[in-house]
Each structure stands twice: as C-alpha cells, then as structure tokens.
Image (cartoon, rainbow, N blue to C red):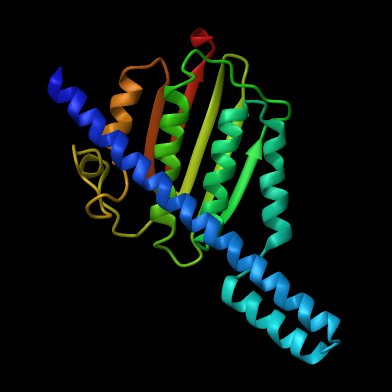
Amino acid sequence: MIEQEKAQDEVNQQYNQLITRQYDDVRQFRHDYQNILLSLDGFIKAEEWDQLRDYFERVLDKHDIQTDDTNRQLGKLIYLQNADLRNLIYTKLLYAKSRGIVVNIEVSESMFIETDETLSLPRMLGIILDNAIEEAAEIQHGELSVSLIQEELESLIIVENSCRVNIESLVTLKENGYSTKGAERGIGLFNLDRLVDKSMILLNTQINDQVFTQELIIPREVI
C-alpha cells in the first residue's frame, strides 16, 4: 500500500509539473500575440501600409496562424455543459495550437456527461490529451481531434492525433515508467490504465495509419 501511494504521489508530481509547464507556454503564447497586436497598431496609426503588409505576412508565416478556424473549433465547446471538462479541453487545445498543432473538435449539441467519475474522468482525459499533444508536436503539420458524442446508453470521448511512423507498440507504451519524452516529461499509458481499472469507464486504444486513437466510454450505468 505504501509503495502504491508513493508511486501515485510521483505521478501526481509529474502531472503538476506538466500542467505548470503548459500554463507557462500558453501564457507566453498570449504575450507574443499581445506584442504583435501592439506592433500592428503602430503601423496602422502611422499609416505605414507597406510595412504593415510585410510585417503581417511575416507573422502569418512564422506562426502559421489560422485564428478564425481555431476560434470556430474552440467555440464548439459551448455545447459541452460539463464546465470542468470544457475548461480542461479548451486549455489543452489552446496549448496544442501554441505548439503548431491543427486542432479539430466535434461536440453533440447540448451535451452533458452525467457520471459519478467526476475526479477520475478529467484526470484520464488530461493524460490522454497531454500525450496526444506531445506526440502530434513531433509531426510536421500534426493534427489533434477531439470528438464528444452522446449516445442513448453511453457517452464517448474520442481523441485522435497524428503519430510517428515508427511509434512504439502499445505493449511498450503501456510499460510501467515508460516515456518517450525523457525524465519528467509525459505521463505514460500505464498510469492511465491504472485509473481506468479503478473506474467504470472503458478505454479503447489503437494505432492505425499514423493515427493514435483513444476512446473513453462512459456508460449510463455509471450515472
């Protein structure tokens, strides 16, 4: 029991470090854009239209900005009525965008996931999104998709991300302590499986055609 508690404490510490690092990255991302807006304002007030066009094109090229599409995607989260899950997904996908990942969201309208697993579900989803972001960031033009589906007997959360051609097998990825990211980076599928095993939530994981898919199934029996 003591060893299990120690192992869980280590997982919690790693997770907190990962969240802190992501928060810092997102804050820097917002700071950069604030500076960009100030620069644009300066060109406009000075009516330096040629310089404005050149600067704007350089910014677009550097950051691969797709603001309108990103806002449309993140805006779909308004249909998810679970505030904790909505905020979690929003933060993670904003971070993914700051890493240059193309994000996509599909949500059933007016969806509310009723579950007793109010603590474990966000934790599971957080781990899945963290690993998906770290993997997709390794791929040029990497993509991350989150689908939230309400069915009659269950709710589904499906996360798909681009992955490397030579990604490790699921057997390897699920080994205790395994991480492709080195010390203090990433939280492996072993820990995710431990959380799933202690809950009524089901998890399906597969790798196919350079797409890593993880599906959380929250049955209505949990309600």
In the figure, 58 relative to 88: above or below? below
Residue 27 in which image quadrant: bottom right
Look at the image and tell me in which quarter the C terminus lies: top right
Which residue occupies the foreground of this view, 131 or 214?
A: 131
Q: Is residue 18 left or right of residue 76?
A: left
In the figure, 37 relative to 74: above or below? below
Q: Residue sitting at 49 percent across and 40 percent down?
A: 159
Residue 24 point in image, percent of width and height: 47, 55
Which residue occupies the foreground of this view, 24 or 166?
A: 24
Residue 154 point in image, percent of width and height: 55, 18
Residue 118 point in image, percent of width and height: 49, 19
Residue 12 point in image, percent of width and height: 31, 34
Q: Is residue 52 left or right of residue 149?
A: right
Q: Residue sitting at 73 percent across and 50 percent down?
A: 72
Which residue occupies the foreground of this view, 156 or 137?
A: 137
Q: Residue sitting at 66 percent across and 66 percent down?
A: 34
In the figure, 115 relative to 24: above or below? above
Look at the image and tell me in which quarter the N terminus lies: top left
Q: Can residue 199 be spotted in the picture?
A: yes
Q: Can residue 211 be spotted in the picture?
A: no
Q: Is residue 51 left or right of residue 135?
A: right
